[in-house]
Amino acid sequence: MKQLPWLVLIIALTGCMGDRSDIEEFVTTTKAQHVAYVPPLKQPPTFEHFVYQAHLMRSPFVPPSRELTEEVIDTTKDCLQPDLKRRKGRLETYALDNLKMRGTLSEKETIWALIETNDGSVYRLGIGEYLGLYHGRIAKVTPQTVEIIELIPDGSGCWAERLSNMELTGE
C-alpha cells in the first residue's frame, strides 16, 4: 500500500513525456507567418521659445489688487441702482445655478427657504435677504418656490430688475 502513491506519480509523469514535435512545429510556423507591425512614431512638434515681454503688467502668479476686483458703478445717474453701502450676504458669491432650494422652515407666519450651495452647505434665508451675483433679493418664499428680484446692469450705468425663480428640487 505504501507504494501506490509512488506508482501513480510515475504513471502521471510518463504521460507528460510524449512527442511534442507537432506543437513545436505549429509554434515556429505561426511565428514565421505572423510578423508584428509597429507603425513608426510621429515626430514631436518643434518647440518654439516665447519671450515674456509684459514686464509692466500684473504677474499671473500674484492675485489682483482689491480695487481691480471691486464693482465700479456710476451712481451719478438718476435711475435704479444697487445699494453699494450694504454689506454683502453670505450667498452673494454664488451664481444662482450653483444654488438649490432644498425645503422650507416656518414658524407662525414666517417662512424661510433652505438653500444648498454647490459645496454642500445649507443656509436658511427669508424674505429680504440677498443671494446670487446680481444683487438678488428674496421677494417671496412659498413651500415650492423662491422668487428672487435681481438687478441686472443695462450697460448705460443703470440697472433693471429681473424676476428669477428657484424651485424645490428633490435630488
Image: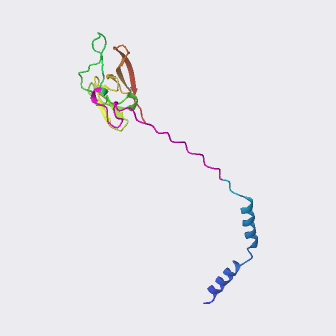
Residue situated in front as seen by the camera: 103 or 37? 37
7 left or right of 57?
right
Residue 50 is covered by the magenta coloring:
yes
> In the rendered view of the protein, which quadrant contains the N terminus?
bottom right
Which residue range is magenta in the image?
38-67
Task: Point out residue 158 in the picture as x, y percentages from the top left corner.
Answer: 34, 13
The figure's colour scheme reads: rainbow
Residue situated in front as seen by the camera: 39 or 121? 39
125 left or right of 22?
left
Q: Image quarter for residue 74?
A: top left
User: Which residue is at a point 75% across and 64% down the rendered structure image?
Assistant: 29
41 left or right of 101?
right
> In the rendered view of the protein, which quadrant contains the C terminus?
top left
* Residue 5, visible in the rendered structure: yes
Q: Main secondary structure of the magenta part?
A: loop
* Residue 89, visible in the rendered structure: no
Residue 75 is covered by the magenta coloring:
no
Above or below 1: residue 15: above
Residue that sits furthest to the top in the current view:
78
User: Which residue is at a point 71% across and 58% down the rendered structure image?
Assistant: 35
**Numbered marks: total:** 0
Task: Point out residue 152 in the picture as x, y percentages from the top left corner.
Answer: 36, 19
Q: Image quarter for residue 43?
A: top right
Q: Image quarter for residue 123?
A: top left
Residue situated in front as seen by the camera: 41 or 17? 41
Task: Point out residue 147 in the picture as x, y percentages from the top left corner.
Answer: 36, 22
Task: Point out residue 166 in the picture as x, y percentages from the top left corner.
Answer: 39, 26
User: Which residue is at a point 34% across and 26% down the rendered structure image?
Assistant: 133
Above or below 31: residue 102: above
User: Which residue is at a point 33% across and 37% down the rendered structure image?
Assistant: 121
